[in-house]
Image (cartoon, rainbow, N blue to C red):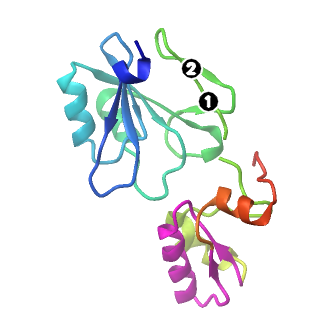
């Protein structure tokens, strides 16, 4: 018997490149992992298995779509679990590297794995319009896949920034290309 095979339900949202899951906790409750804002697929999977979503975990900051975790908290009373480093502005249980949460017989342990390029300034795409002037000229713009980086570069260029470059790939690709190790922490 495998927990993943028997209790982890992949949720597929057409059009999003997001991996989301519903974890059956074995007692009629479930953990939603990286739920998208459109909760129809998740709700159908949960109701089909007689599950109530008790926890909603965001494994990372979602710059490419809105998380459904806040809606699950509002509608279902789910406890939102999210990285302490994310500085989210909604009620949630803040998790740092090594923190553990008892889900009722199953323990969830947070592992900080998301390193950053040395000297990089992190600006979420949604926050960029308010921070256009704080971005240095000649910036190298990047994201995990490239789509958001192109959008960010377009916004910066429209605001008068010149000499921009868009890095193909994400932080791991940058580290591999330069041979420089990623930094961890804030």
- Name the spot of residue 116 as percent of width and height, x first: 71, 55
Q: Is residue 7 above or below residue 70?
A: above
Q: Which residue does the image show at 27% across and 36% down from the upper left?
A: 42
Q: Which residues are magenta?
A: 138-166
Res. 119 image quadrant: bottom right
- Name the spot of residue 132 as percent of width and height, x first: 61, 77
Secondary structure beneath disc 2?
A: strand
Reply yes or no: does residue 165 show up in magenta: yes
Q: Which residue is mark 2?
A: 101
Secondary structure beneath disc 1?
A: loop
Q: Which residue does the image show at 40% across and 55% down from the upper left?
A: 65
Q: Determine whether label 2 and label 1 are within 8 Å by CB.
A: yes
Q: Is residue 30 visible?
A: no
Q: Which residue is mark 1?
A: 110
Res. 95 image quadrant: top right
Q: Which residue does the image show at 42% across and 23% down from the upper left?
A: 4
Classed neighbour count for the residue bearing mark 1: other residues with Cα under 10 Å, few (<14), some (14–19), many (≥20) = some
Reply yes or no: does residue 87 show up in magenta: no
Q: Is residue 64 visible?
A: yes
5 left or right of 150?
Answer: left
């Amino acid at each position: 018997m495998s927990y993943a095979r028997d209790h982890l339900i992949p949720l597929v949202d057409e059009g999003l490149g997001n991996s989301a899951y519903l974890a059956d906790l074995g007692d009629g409750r479930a953990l939603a992992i990286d739920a998208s804002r459109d909760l129809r697929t998740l709700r159908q999977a949960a109701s089909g298995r007689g599950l109530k979503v008790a926890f909603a975990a965001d494994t990372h900051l979602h710059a490419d779509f809105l998380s459904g975790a806040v809606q699950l908290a509002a509608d279902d009373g789910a406890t939102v679990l999210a990285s302490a480093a994310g500085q989210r502005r909604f009620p949630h249980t803040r998790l740092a590297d090594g923190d553990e949460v008892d889900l009722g017989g199953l323990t969830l342990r947070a592992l900080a794995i998301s390193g950053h390029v040395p000297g990089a300034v992190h600006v979420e795409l949604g926050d960029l319009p308010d921070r256009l002037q704080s971005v240095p000229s000649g910036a190298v713009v990047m994201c995990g896949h490239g789509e958001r980086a192109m959008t960010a570069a377009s916004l910066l260029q429209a605001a008068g920034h010149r000499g921009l470059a868009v890095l193909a790939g994400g932080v791991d690709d940058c580290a591999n290309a330069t041979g420089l190790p990623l930094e961890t922490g804030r």
